[in-house]
Image (cartoon, rainbow, N blue to C red):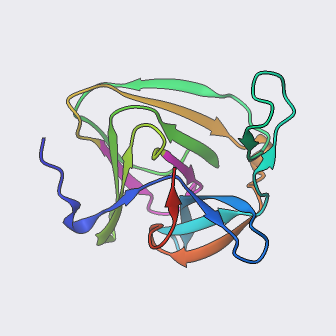
Amino acid sequence: MHIPFSIATLSLLSLVNSQSTNTTYLVAPALITRNNHTVIQCWKLASPFKGSATPGISGAQVATISNNTNFAYTIVPPRFDGGLHTAPVPQIVHFFSGFAHVTLPHDDSVGLWFVGGKGGLGFALDTTGTGHITTYPSDQETLIITAPFADGIVPEHEVLNEGPCGGKQTFI
């Protein structure tokens, strides 16, 4: 399978360490609506990772992202075209396998490649406007979990930059 990386940026879930506090934060791309168009931003969540005391993962690092409702597990067939659409609700989207290619209908110079697994997390918040196009170019099924934010409440975050995430981040 040939994947054209020339117009897209690989979306990787990443951790960013704050130099001043040595605290780790979750960083992921977000699709939002601005001036009736979907745009991509790189977000750093406001709540840092913390040590867990939960049995079975005690001592591991955990980032509490949000309260969620209607958690869904989706199986997308190979080479599926999701077409032009907006997010049905503000939600977390995590691709566990396969590939998803997200492009913007008004700007073909930027896009996201979500690689199933640890690089597959993003936020879909563009519930209005022109939306985005999602295709699944893999020869495999793509497995997706969507988790709408309870009451549409989006986690507190800082916009690191306009456009996809990249640069000097530590990828997990």
Residue 84 picture location, percent across and down: 36, 50
Residue 110 located left or right of residue 6: right
Between 78 and 125, the one nearer to me in the picture? 78
Residue 103 picture location, percent across and down: 33, 59
Residue 96 located left or right of residue 115: right
Q: Residue furthest left?
A: 2
Residue 38 seen from this side: no
Residue appearing at x 49%, y 51% in the figure: 86
Residue appearing at x 57%, y 35% in the figure: 146
Q: Which region of the structure is painted magenta?
A: 121-135
Compared with residue 114, is residue 71 higher up or lower down, i.e. above or below? Answer: above
Residue appearing at x 53%, y 24% in the figure: 73
100 part of magenta stretch: no
Compared with residue 153, is residue 97 higher up or lower down, i.e. above or below? Answer: above
Residue 140 picture location, percent across and down: 26, 26
Residue 54 picture location, percent across and down: 84, 28
127 part of magenta stretch: yes
On the rendered image, what quadrant is the N terminus found in? Answer: top left
Q: Residue furthest right?
A: 53
Residue 125 seen from this side: yes
Residue appearing at x 20%, y 67% in the figure: 6
Q: Which picture quadrant has residue 157?
A: bottom right
